[in-house]
Amino acid sequence: MVRWKLWQDSVDTSRLEEYFAQREWANLYLAKLYYRSLQDRESWCRFLLGYDHAQLIGVLALDLDRRLLADVRMAVSTDDIEFHQILLHRWHRPYCLIGHPQILKQIEVLYGKSHQFIAVDYFLMTLEHVGSGKRYMEIPTNFSFQTSLPEDFHRLLPLEIGYQKEEVMVAKQHMMSETAIAIHFQRRLRDEIGYHLAYKSHALAKLSINVVGRKYDQVAGVYTDPRFRMKGLATMLLSEAIRLYQRNSKGLTLFVKVQNPGAHKLYRSLGFEEKQYFRISYL
């Protein structure tokens, strides 16, 4: 029987350190929140830890954006009084759940699903040994691989709007106007690492590193202008980004929709491997 409790003391901190040393890749959103909370003890009350005897086998956390982040090492039960008490009575109801499907599906039932409920399932993939024995596509001389900067906002915005509409706006309550997308994107250009593939002054494909961890960074927002798809542009872009990681010991993670076999094939061709399923649901 799994025993659930809030993060309280140095023993819990030690167990969390061990947990994320092994499973940072499994939910970088959750790992990053943990790293930040090490310096903010008041935030420990937003972490729920699942123990099987002395072994930490699951971690949940509610961030300030009301996203419930979850990861488990193995199949676990949430049939625990403390678990129900904290989620239903002490924490605010989240607007979305992000993480391992095995526990997310139980939490969805616990909270109850609204008529707008929707869930999207992904493969979580990792690139562990960047560049080891792999040959990546070269960029033609008339193309350029560029770091995305705030001054690139106007030429990258059409790609971001396309990405948000095709990949992100899966729930009615998650719809954003193009103005809202633009405001959000300006902040991300400032706060995140981004790269794009350009032909002369035209941006054709983009990606971002939206979460930076200790051992892994997360690739997100991969998008190619629909007019120029099926020409290998995403492969070129990702190949150049991967080359940057050949200079350090970090791995890469990403998640791709289960129902997107084309993208799945692309990432496998670049050396990414499936590690587990991943789920995002909107209550």
Image (tube, helix red, strand yellow):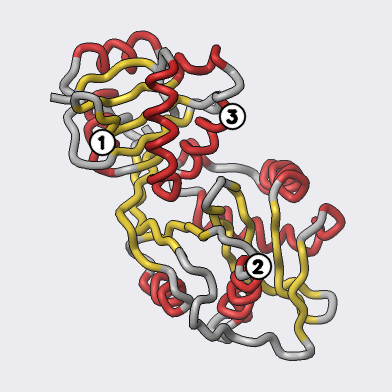
Furthest-right residue in view? 151
Density class for disc 2 (Cα within 10 Å; few <14, some 14-19, many ≥20) is few
* Distance from the alpha carbon under mark 2 to that under mark 3: 26 Å
Secondary element at tag 2? loop
Residue 236 x/y as whole percent? 62, 80
- 34 sits to left or right of 108: right
Which amino acid does the dot numbered 3 rest on?
Arg
Secondary element at tag 1? helix
Residue 210 x/y as whole percent? 61, 49
- 151 sits to left or right of 192: right
Q: Which mark is residue 247?
A: 2
* Distance from the alpha carbon under mark 2 to that under mark 1: 36 Å
Where is residue 126, by image quadrant?
Answer: bottom left
Density class for disc 1 (Cα within 10 Å; few <14, some 14-19, many ≥20) is many
Q: Nearer the viewer, residue 49 or 56?
A: 56
Q: Which residue is mark 1?
A: 103
Which amino acid does the dot numbered 2 rest on?
Arg
Give the residue displayed 77% in from the left and 46% down from the top.
190
Residue 232 x/y as whole percent? 57, 84
Q: Which residue is mark 3?
A: 36
Question: Could one spot residue 96 in this view of the protein?
Answer: no
Residue 162 x/y as whole percent? 61, 61
**Label pair 1/3, CB-CB below 8 angstroms:** no
Furthest-left residue in view? 1
Question: Could one spot residue 140 in this view of the protein?
Answer: yes
Q: Nearer the viewer, residue 167 or 8?
A: 8
Give the residue displayed 49% in from the left and 82% down from the top.
133
